[in-house]
């Protein structure tokens, strides 16, 4: 006659292993939450950096436009000065 299977006896070693497993699972869950929070913070920082980059690009374009305008104004002034000089000195 075979003996019926008995559930394993709850001994101290099994209980300690169960406690350790539960603690490790809790730590993994905490790490997962921390990782999610860190990734969210990284995404927010990337969004801020992209917004700053867009502003820098916008300001760079504005500076380029201003430089172009001032170059045209300077060229116009130089042309006008040359024309006035030629007009003044040719009349003598």
Image (spheres, rainbow, N blue to C red):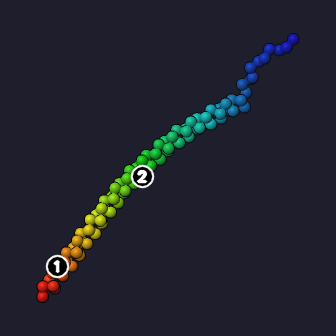
Residue at (33, 59) in percent of width and height: 61
The image shows residue 50 at horizontal and vertical percentages of 41, 51
Percent position (x, y) of residue 60?
Answer: 35, 60
Find residue 84 and name its label: 1
Residue 13 placement, left or right of 41? right
Residue 82 placement, left or right of 21? left
Quarter assignment of residue 58: bottom left
**Cα distance between the residues tagged 2 and 1:** 52 Å
Near-viewer residue (36 or 76): 76
- Percent of width and height locating residue 48: 40, 49
Q: Which residue is mark 2?
A: 49
2 or 1: tag closer to the N-terminus: 2
Residue drawn at x 21%, y 73% as measured from the top left: 77
Q: Please, is residue 34 above or below residue 73 in the view?
A: above
- Residue at position x 19%, y 78% from top? 83
- Proximity of marks 2 and 1: CB atoms separated by less than 8 Å: no
Which quadrant of the structure image shows residue 78?
Answer: bottom left
| Local SS, label 2 | helix
The residue closer to the viewer here, 76 or 45, is: 76
**Quarter of the figure that contains the N terminus:** top right
Please tell me how crowded label 1 is: few (under 14), some (14-19), or many (20+) other residues with Cα within 10 Å.
few
- SS for callout 1: helix
**What's the residue at 72%, 25% (across, down)?**
10
Q: Nearer the viewer, residue 80 or 64?
A: 80
Task: Locate residue 41, reporting x and y percent.
Answer: 46, 45
Crowd band around label 2 with a 10 angstrom C-alpha radius: few (<14), some (14–19), many (20+): few
Q: Is residue 50 above or below residue 30?
A: below
Q: Nearer the viewer, mark 2 or mark 1?
A: 1
């Amino acid at each position: 006659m075979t003996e019926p299977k008995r559930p394993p006896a709850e001994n101290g070693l099994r209980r300690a292993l169960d406690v350790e497993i539960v603690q490790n699972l809790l730590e993994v869950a905490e790490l997962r939450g921390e990782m999610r929070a860190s990734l969210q913070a990284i995404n927010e920082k990337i969004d801020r950096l992209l917004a700053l980059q867009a502003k820098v690009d916008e300001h760079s374009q504005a500076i380029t436009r201003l430089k172009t305008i001032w170059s045209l104004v300077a060229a116009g002034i130089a042309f006008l000065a040359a024309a006035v000089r030629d007009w003044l000195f040719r009349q003598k």
